Image (tube, grey):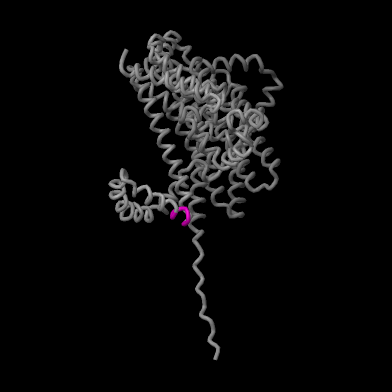
Amino acid sequence: MSAAHIVGIVAAVAIAALAIWKRKKLGFEKTAVLLLVAVGLVVWASGLLSLLPNPEKVIEDIAKTLGPWTYALVGVMAFLETGAFVGLIAPGEFTVIIGGVVAGQGEISIVALIGLAWLCCVLGDTASFFIGKRLGRAFLVKHGPKVRIDEDTLKRVESYFDRHGGKTVLIGRFIGLVRAVAPFVAGSSGMRYRQFLPFSVLGTGLWATTFSLLGFFFYRSFEKVANVAGQVTLVFGTLVAIIVGGVWAYRRLREEEQRRAFMAWLDKQGRKPLLRPVAAVVRPVWRRVIVPVSRVLAPQLRFLWKRITPGGLGIELTTALAVSAVGSYTFALTTVDVVDPGYKGATRFDNRVIDMVDNLRNDVGVDVAKIVTQLGNPSVVFPLVAIGIVLLAWRRRPYELFVLLTGTLLVYAGVHITKAAVDRPRPAGSLVDAAGSSFPSGHAAYATIYVALGVIAARVLPNLMSQAVLVVGTVVTAAVVGASRVYLGAHYYSDVLAGWALGAFVFATCAIVALVVSYVRQNGREAPPAPQQREPAAEHG
């Protein structure tokens, strides 16, 4: 037995003795916690933990045995981490890293793995959010006092999530305990799902991509990459704590009275014998270097922080970022599948969709689909774009005009450039005239213009219900147009999916640019008012 183990046993005995001796004063809860700590120290000192299998090794062996079934393992664990609070017991990044390791060994696709982990994380967050919303405030009010959450604390939590809930969901995805409970707290605190979802999509996308690629690039040494992941998580959590502490200190010290009290406390500490040498060095550095530099940099840092803070420009920017991320990923994933040498024509999923459509196809459906599919024809869509551009110019809405015009041109160029690059043959037996490359579907891509028109129009409609109906209606239109191309045999399903993804990515990216430029220009025009000069009082003779 090592010296550390002996110290651990001695500490356990001391803690247990203290807990029993002071049990009446400490109360049941604190006594139980101290006894559990003592038991934990005894178990550690006894060496029993070394007899347990390494959980990381167990996961690695399971993944290697599963092979392609690793997808299921990663997906289930990614969902359960927040959907069933498993993250409170076992951090989910190790399972995702394992998936990356298996992908690096060539057993599964890294692109598909990232997409699956991303989707399952979002679903897990959503499940946890609605569990919190269902149990909600009543659950916390009833059981909160057991963990010292009273009514005042609950109100502060709700107020915090009103102001910073989105940032907490996004940044907390990379902090173990926060990741496991943040969606539940967001739901129970009354945060709206439409505000929660974009941050969840962004956070889970970054998280799934980071740890999947970490395992993929360092697949030859799982132990090494696991240690790196742990260190990265620890460093990130430490940085977040430092930033949060810095923001809290900045807000407290903005008031002159608070600053004087803080400086008085520092002076008092500096007069203590042990800290006197430190104070002798810190004081001149603080007064001659840190304070002057902070005064110069503070405005620039404040401006930069507001530009890069997630959601700082509102839920519109966060939603656009989420749509752009999902669209770009989906387009890349579909393109990789289509250009795979193993798929000369249809992919596996394309063949499944073809079989399903063959069973559903009938004469009436074909006639309806031939009418619906014309809504994605450039001869129908582009005149609507021209009308929209004229109306936006007349109403002097330059940013919406930029999104519509630039997005339409980029979608048109993206469709034709990709068609020429991929040059995929059309499906056999098309029920409408269709020529040229099949990938991506131009009709599906152009149908996303309806969504852009709907969102732009919704920005000027005063009634919330009419906004929702308009946006949902245009999304349904885009979906139906794309589905009609598959139903008529003019495109594979992957062609249509790529068209939707391309349009979503382009218009969301244009919206991001417009929102940021509009915000920066608006703040640039808001100069502080000039101080008024007091006129001298008139002299009375």
Q: Position of residue 102 (x, y in %)?
A: 40, 15
Main SS of the magenta part reads helix
* Count of numbered marks: 0
**Does residue 426 appear in this view?**
no
Q: Say which residue appears at 40% left-offset and 12% top-offset.
A: 49
> Relative to the observer, which residue lies in front, 152 or 185?
152
Q: On the rendered structure, is 17 left or right of 25? A: left
**Does residue 314 appear in this view?**
yes
Q: Position of residue 500 (x, y in %)?
A: 55, 31
Q: Position of residue 65 (x, y in %)?
A: 43, 8
Q: Magenta stretch: residue 252 in it? A: no
Q: Is residue 514 above or below residue 420?
A: below
| Magenta part of the chain | 256-260
Q: Magenta stretch: residue 257 in it? A: yes
Q: Is residue 364 above or below residue 466?
A: above
Q: Extreme bottom residue here?
A: 541
Q: Is residue 162 above or below residue 332?
A: below
Q: Say which residue appears at 70% left-offset and 20% top-offset.
A: 363
Q: On the rendered structure, is 197 left or right of 243? A: right
Q: Please tell me in which quadrant of the rendered image residue 314 appears.
A: top right
State which quarter of the image contains the C terminus. Answer: bottom right
> Relative to the observer, which residue lies in front, 139 or 388?
139
